Image (cartoon, helix red, strand yellow):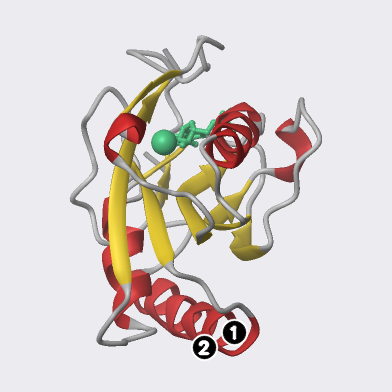
Amino acid sequence: MSPEPLLKAADIQARVLELGKNISSSYKFDMVISILTGAFIFTADLCRAMPSKDLQIRFIKASSYGKSTESSGNLKVSGLENLDLKGSRILLVDDILDSGRTLKTLVEMLKNEGAADVRTCVLLDKKDRREVPIKADFCGFEIPNEFVVGYGLDFANDYRSFPDIWTLTEKV
Ligand code: IMP
Ligand code: MG
């Protein structure tokens, strides 16, 4: 682990509040779709930063990493089959944009399921790692090309409960 957090909990909270305000004032959507597992904490905080009685929140699961800091490249998606997306405007929320494959694939899948509009929101963006062309509509922080954990992000399912975001220095 890095000796100091890359992003402290208080700075994350402040940025998430700002993001919630920006999104509420610029995008009228029907449903938040959050990508498990990494985005669960970010989604909880983001939704509370844009409170509304009828805000709909759904979860789908996508995984590609397994027990490594490098994506395996083949994306497993589940939970989409239970959603009725026809004509809906969606805010798709993920923890981090890396190669871009997860978000790009999911945006296409949601559109194929009949979504009228899909905009994306990520807490973190590792711009230098992009392998497919995609830009998040809303982004919390741009970060360097390093593997990070905490605030929902894991390495092999560890570290998710850490309130700050840390750089993992020993790679596997
Ligand atoms: P992409 O498909 O390469 O853009 O990868 C995105 C997914 O990989 C995210 O949803 C994360 O779950 C995971 N991921 C990418 N980078 C990191 C990282 O630095 N720490 C933890 N998970 C990561
Ligand atoms: Mg993920």
The dot on residue 131 is none
**Is residue 109 shown left or right of residue 172?**
right
- Which residue is painted at 48% across and 17% down in the image? 75
Relative to 48, is 110 above or below?
A: above
Q: Residue furthest front?
A: 86
Relative to 1, is 24 above or below?
A: below
Q: Is mark 1 within 8 Å of ligand 1?
A: no
**Is residue 67 shown left or right of residue 172?**
left
Identify residue type, mark 2. Lys
Disc 2 versus disc 1: distance between alpha carbons? 4 Å
Out of 158 and 139, give the one closest to the viewer: 139
Q: Which residue is mark 2?
A: 21
Q: Position of residue 140 (x, y in %)?
A: 57, 66
Q: Position of residue 53 (x, y in %)?
A: 25, 86
Residue 116 visible within the image:
yes
Q: Which residue is mark 1?
A: 22
Residue 14, picture quadrant: bottom left
Which quarter shows the N terminus? top left
Residue 127, picture quadrant: top right
- Which residue is painted at 55% across and 32% down in the image? 109
- Which residue is painted at 55% across and 50% down in the image? 115
Marker count (numbered): 2
Asked whether the beta carbons under mark 2 and mark 1 sit within 8 Å of each other, the answer is: yes
Identify residue type, mark 1. Asn
